[in-house]
């Protein structure tokens, strides 16, 4: 399962590391790809993880989650 997020406020490699580190704390997260240019975060999950938990993790790092889309 994959989720694609639009995230505002990321501007550097520190931002990428913070988002990846925050999401990697969930055992369901298999992979995280961050594109600063596209303001996008792609998450690969082994099983369901609520959008609310994902959003909270990213917003706790100081960024704004604008959209979350699920892809199968």
Image (cartoon, helix red, strand yellow):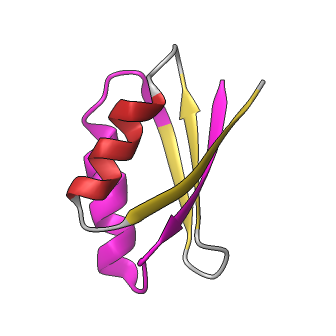
Q: Position of residue 42 (x, y in %)?
A: 60, 49
Query: Where 52 falls versus 37 (above or below)?
Result: above
Q: Position of residue 59 (x, y in %)?
A: 30, 56
Residue sitting at x 35%, y 58%: 19
Q: Which of the 4 image quadrants contains residue 70?
A: top right
Position of 61 with respect to 16 (left or right) is left
Query: Where 50 falls versus 33 (above or below)?
Result: above
Residue sitting at x 51%, y 15%: 48
> Which of 8 and 40 lies nearest the eye of the viewer?
8
Query: Where 6 falls versus 28 (above or below)?
Result: below
Residue sitting at x 37%, y 80%: 13
Q: In this view, which residue lies farthest toward the top?
A: 47
- Whether residue 22 appears in magenta in the rendering, the answer is yes
- Whether residue 40 appears in magenta in the rendering, the answer is no
> Which of 19 and 69 lies nearest the eye of the viewer?
69
What is the magenta range?
Answer: 1-30
């Amino acid at each position: 399962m994959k989720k694609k997020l639009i995230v505002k406020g990321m501007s550097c490699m520190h931002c990428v590391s913070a988002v990846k580190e925050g999401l990697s704390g969930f055992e369901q997260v298999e992979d995280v790809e961050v594109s600063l240019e596209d303001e996008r975060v792609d998450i690969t999950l082994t099983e369901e993880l609520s959008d609310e938990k994902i959003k909270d993790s990213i917003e706790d790092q100081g960024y704004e989650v604008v959209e979350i889309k699920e892809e199968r």
